[in-house]
Image (cartoon, grey):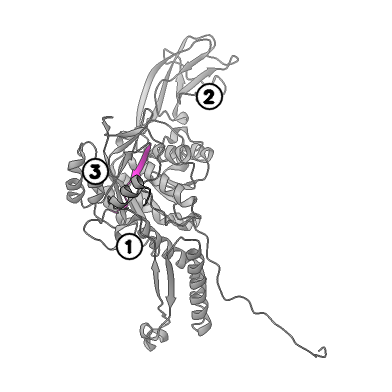
Amino acid sequence: MPYEHGITVQENATSVTPPVQTSSGVQVVIGTAPIHLALDPLAAVNKPILASTWDQVVKGLGYSENFKSYSLCESMYASFKLFQVAPVVFINVLDPAIHKAAATDQAVTLTKGAGVIDVEGVLLSTIVVKSTDGTKTFAKNTDYTVSFNKNNRPAISVIPTGTIGAATGVKVSFDKLDPTKVTKEDIIGGYNAATGKYSGAELIRQVFPMFGLTPGLLLAPGWSHLPEVGLILDAKARKINGNFNCINILDMDTTVVKKYEDAAAWKANNSYTSERSVVLWPKIKVGNLILSHSAVEAASMAQIDASNDDVPFVSPSNKRLPISGTVLADGTEVYLEQTQANALNGAGIVTAINWNGWRSWGNNTAAYPNTTDPKDRFIAIRRVFDWWSNTFIQTYFDRVDDPLNFRLIESVVDSENLRANGYQAKGQIAGASIEFSQELNSQSDILAGKITFIQKIAAFTPAEHIVNILEFDPTILTNSIFGGE
């Protein structure tokens, strides 16, 4: 050993654990997609598909602006076109093995060796091309090629060296997707004990194991106005994978609720009253497109999070929406003035108003007015609590099964208080603190390997109501006239 003389300084590794960076606004969207346009249609059925770019989502699921048939495209459009926010997890339940219809002997005219099957949803792999008299079946890539044109219709091109020759027509048979066969039961999904496979909303539980992402927003545009679907989404937002919580974004049925006065009763009668639900009325219009409000609101919330360091402390209310208007399902335009919109807010319903441009309007979860607890009433505070707890779980999961000693406890307390100070300094929370007390940790619990912390956190309430009291001051008037003499 070297001879030691003087002062020696040593450093220990920092006991503060850096937090795991999570994306608080990850949308998990359940619905139907035009998978006939995807690169591999069969690979996109009842499987979570993660998309971070427009190209990814189009290749993985296809895209169509027929939103009534393909509801996932509403969130594709809202997320990647309107708000340019990602990632989004899509779950398509439209299954070409089940939700299909067969077409036989459809005549296709050929002009200069080209023709179009003018039918939506055709599955390319099922197309069979025959002569007009049906006596000869032509071979793909030998006699003809087929691919989708810009209108998403299969275009047949005759190969000059093939046997179709100069024929002016052919007959085709094929299977096509039939979205009308998809039911709310498909959206709700379940578990098949025989195959060991999940479907529909049950696939939410696979998002974290597959991608390492915690769901932040659950939605099913085009379907969540059905109470059976809405209530299932609310249930699925709790204890995902036994650990994580999030909120769900639900629509109201605008074929039933055609005026704002009827919205509160519909919401109450259908039990859309959860602190984990954001309920919206009416629908949204962008140009000639009509979208579910949930698709637009969820994308907006994700974009707001991304603009604020992935901390969901900013309310989505009074934020600009790049839309043309609000409508009912039949396209009837809806214009709410502020007092009417406020009446919806008072019933726990979020809407949109046109105040020098369209903007979201409403801070309350669906639990309001039945609860006034800030953490369950306000959307932003509810989301901060969920985000904080989800992050805590991920940050300290590696500490589970470590020796239960003072070093472990001190590390958690120091790390959390340091984390809280950082967010407080940025103005993202009002403050937070964590304690380990003897009162909450009995000897029997410690011997059983259980320790309990208590953490208090204060998130900012939204400045929902700003009051300015005006008072006439005659002194000011007198001084104005007489110069203050």
Image height check: is 94 above or below 270?
above
- In the picture, measured across the screen, residue 233 lies left or right of residue 35, that is left
Tell me which residue sits at (21%, 40%) in the image: 260
Residue 98: quarter of image = top left
Looking at the image, is 325 positioned above or below residue 20?
above
Q: Which of marks 1 and 2 is nearer the N terminus?
A: 2
> Is 362 included in the stretch rendered in magenta?
yes
- Quadrant for residue 118, please give it: top left
Could you say which is closer to the camera, residue 200 or residue 150? 150
For the record, the magenta segment spans 357-365
Q: Mark 3 and 1 residues: CB-CB less than 8 Å, in contact?
A: no
Bin the neighbour count of mark 3 within 10 Å (Cα to Cα): few under 14, some 14-19, many 20 and up: few
Q: Can residue 220 be seen in this view?
A: no
Inspect the image, locate mark 3, and give the three-letter code of the amino acid beneath it: Thr
Q: Is residue 10 above or below residue 162?
A: below
**Residue 477 within the magenta-colored segment of the rendering:** no
**Marker disc for residue 339:** 3
Q: What secondary structure is found at the residue carrying circle 2?
A: loop
Amino acid type assigned to the residue bearing label 1 in the image: Lys
Q: Which amino acid does label 2 sit on?
A: Lys
Name the one closer to the observer, 204 or 276.
276
CA separation, marks 3 and 1? 25 Å
Q: Mark 2 points at which residue?
A: 140
Earlier along the polypeptide chain: callout 3 or callout 1? Answer: 3
How far across and down, in percent of the image, does residue 166 sit? 53, 8
Residue 395 showing in the rendered view: yes
Q: Position of residue 370 (x, y in %)?
A: 21, 58
Residue 463 — which label?
Answer: none
Label 2 CA crowd tier, 10 Å (few <14, some 14–19, many 20+): some
